[in-house]
Amino acid sequence: MLISFCTYDDVLDLLAVESACFDEPWTERMFADELAAQGVFYLKASDGGRTVGFIGVRTVLDEANVNNIAVMPGYRRAGVGKRLIENAFGTLAEQGVKSVYLEVDTENTAAIGLYAGFGFVPVGKIAEYYPNGNDAYLLKCNMLDGQAKK
C-alpha cells in the first residue's frame, strides 16, 4: 500500500472512489477546486497502481478539518483508513497543527471507532447534516508532537 499526495491528475481517481462510497458523491469540479485551494492537501492510498482510498484536509492556522475520507468497499477494515489518517497527522504535525476536526454520521459506528482510536472525541452534534437527513457528530482531536493527545 502506497500513500502519496494527490495532484490534479488524480481527480478522476478520487471521483471513482467517492462514487463507489457515497450515494451523493462530490463532483469532478469539487475535487479540482479542493486540490487548487490554499491550505488543502489530499493523500491517496494506492494498491498496485489503483487508488483505493483518500483523505482530504483543510488547514487554517493551527487547526485542520478533515473534509473527506473514503475507502473502497473491498478495502475497508484492512487498515487503509488508519494509514491515511496516520500520514495526514504526520503532515499536520509538520505544519504545527494543534487541533483536528471532522464530521461523521452518527450511525457510522465503524468510522467513529476508527476516529476514537486516534483520540477524536465528540464536541457537538449537527442535526440533519447529511443529504439523507442523518445527524453528524462533530469530533475533535488535540495534537501533541504529531500524535493524538488522549
Image (cartoon, helix red, strand yellow):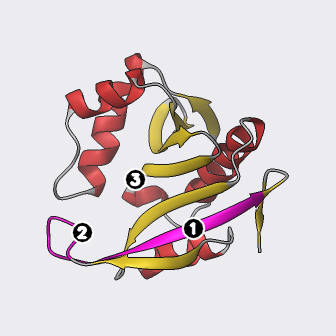
Q: Identify which residue is drawn at 54% across, 40% down.
A: 60
- In which quadrant of the rendered image does the N terminus lie? top right
Q: Which mark is residue 129?
A: 2
Q: Nearer the viewer, residue 48 or 77?
A: 77
Question: Sequence-wise, which precedes: disc 2 or disc 1?
Answer: 2
Question: Sequence-wise, which precedes: disc 2 or disc 3?
Answer: 3
Q: Amino acid at mark 3?
A: Met
- In the rendering, at what x and y percent does residue 2 appear? 64, 36
- Contact flag, marks 2 and 1 (Cβ < 8 Å): no
From the image, state whether disc 1 or disc 3 is nearer to you: 1
Given the current orientation, which residue lies at the most extreme top position? 9
Question: Sequence-wise, which precedes: disc 1 or disc 3?
Answer: 3
Is 101 left, or right, of 118 in this rendering?
A: left
Rounded to the nearest whole Å, what is the CA distance between mark 2 and mark 3?
23 Å
- In the rendering, at what x and y percent does residue 95 appear? 71, 36
Q: Secondary structure at mark 1?
A: strand
- The answer to whether residue 69 is magenta is no
Residue receiving disc 1: 140
Rounded to the nearest whole Å, what is the CA distance between mark 2 and mark 1?
17 Å
Q: Amino acid at mark 2?
A: Tyr
Rounded to the nearest whole Å, what is the CA distance between mark 1 and mark 3?
25 Å
Q: Nearer the viewer, residue 26 or 64?
A: 64
- In the rendering, at what x and y percent does residue 48 appear? 55, 33
- Residues in magenta? 128-143
Residue receiving disc 3: 72
| Quarter of the rendering containing residue 104 | bottom left
Q: Secondary structure at mark 3?
A: loop
From the image, state whether disc 2 or disc 3 is nearer to you: 2
